Amino acid sequence: MITIPDLQTALLDLLYEVRGTEVRFIIGGGYGLYLKADYVRHTAVQTLFREWPEPRSTNDLDLFLRPELLIQSAKLTPLVEAFARLGYQVVPGAENYQFVKVDPNGISDGSIKIDILTGPQKGFEGTPVRTDGRRAKPKPSVGIHAHPVNEAPTLEKGLLTIELHGKLSSGQLWQADVFLPHPFTFLMMKIFAFRDRLNDADKEFGRYHALDMYTIMATTMENEWEQAIEFRDKYADEPYVIEAGKLVLEYFSDLDRMGMIRLRESPYFRQELQIDEFMSALRELFPGKN
């Protein structure tokens, strides 16, 4: 079973291999949420809610690449070489944007998976990068693609720098900077992920996405909330922001809505969680637009 320390070691190994290059990672997914909660806990800053759920388990790393790295694809060569040196293999059917490092015993639960993602397709208009709903493909090709996330128009806005430090798999101490998406961006991605997984039994019917939305809101710092309000107003006409408002109204505006039902079904849910405040804050950020 993959643990948070396993993911940290895997990420540090990768950061070590690309040291001194222009490759930088924005960390999403469950591990990104863990890093944010760990950061605010250790800095003791005030956050939007006082009650948080315990961190959920995850066995993968969601690594977002800045679009400029795909546009200038030669800058990705160090990442390709790092994957090879560290023993990662492409995932069949998701070649070049999903990689897996298989456990020596061949146990799938002991395998670390890395998803490579990037910003919206429209960010590549007028560039050599070819995109569709699944992939952004650099030209010339270097062996790395990325999954474009159209619901993240603010991907590079308001990033939080985190200093990650610990031991490499070799035992050597190492530290390097990674970046976390702004809560507004993170919420946008999770709202759409919940919609896509609502009826998917293999993905727990979106329960962990609903829980993640609460965690993102709960660990939002005061300055991030102010920025989020600015993003709400600045990007109010963005189609995906408008759609996010509709989804919040449909799934998270009342306790009997399916998003709130799924949230309370999560094994990580506790009665102490501030779900009324969560619904109110979510509607304030994503009020929708007629």
Image (cartoon, rainbow, N blue to C red):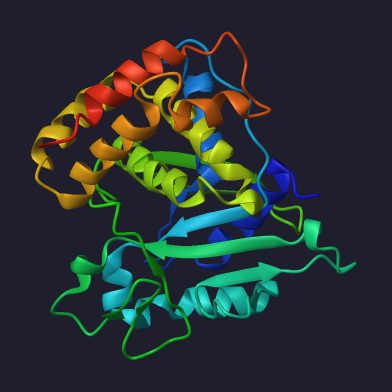
Q: Residue furthest front?
A: 256
Residue at 27% over, 24% down: 283
Query: Viewer-proximal residue, 83 or 211?
Result: 211
Which quadrant would residue 205 be assigned to in this image?
A: top right
Q: Is residue 231 above or below residue 59?
A: above
**216 relative position to 207: left or right:** left
Residue 19 seen from this side: no
Query: Viewer-proximal residue, 201 or 118?
Result: 201
Relative image position of residue 178 (x, y in whole percent) = 45, 48
Relative image position of residue 290 (x, y in whole percent) = 10, 37
Relative image position of residue 86 (x, y in whole percent) = 67, 72
**221 relative position to 99: left or right:** left
Relative image position of residue 288 (x, y in whole percent) = 18, 34
Query: Viewer-proximal residue, 157 or 233?
Result: 233
Q: How many marks?
A: 0
**286 relative position to 171: left or right:** left
Residue at 18% over, 27% down: 229
Q: Is residue 102 above or below residue 286?
A: below
Which quadrant would residue 31 be assigned to in this image?
A: top right
Q: Is residue 14 above or below residue 229?
A: below
Residue at 37% over, 66% down: 22
Q: Is residue 254 above or below residue 180?
A: above
Residue 232 seen from this side: yes
Q: Residue furthest bottom?
A: 140
Query: Viewer-proximal residue, 133 or 123?
Result: 133
Residue at 23% over, 50% down: 240
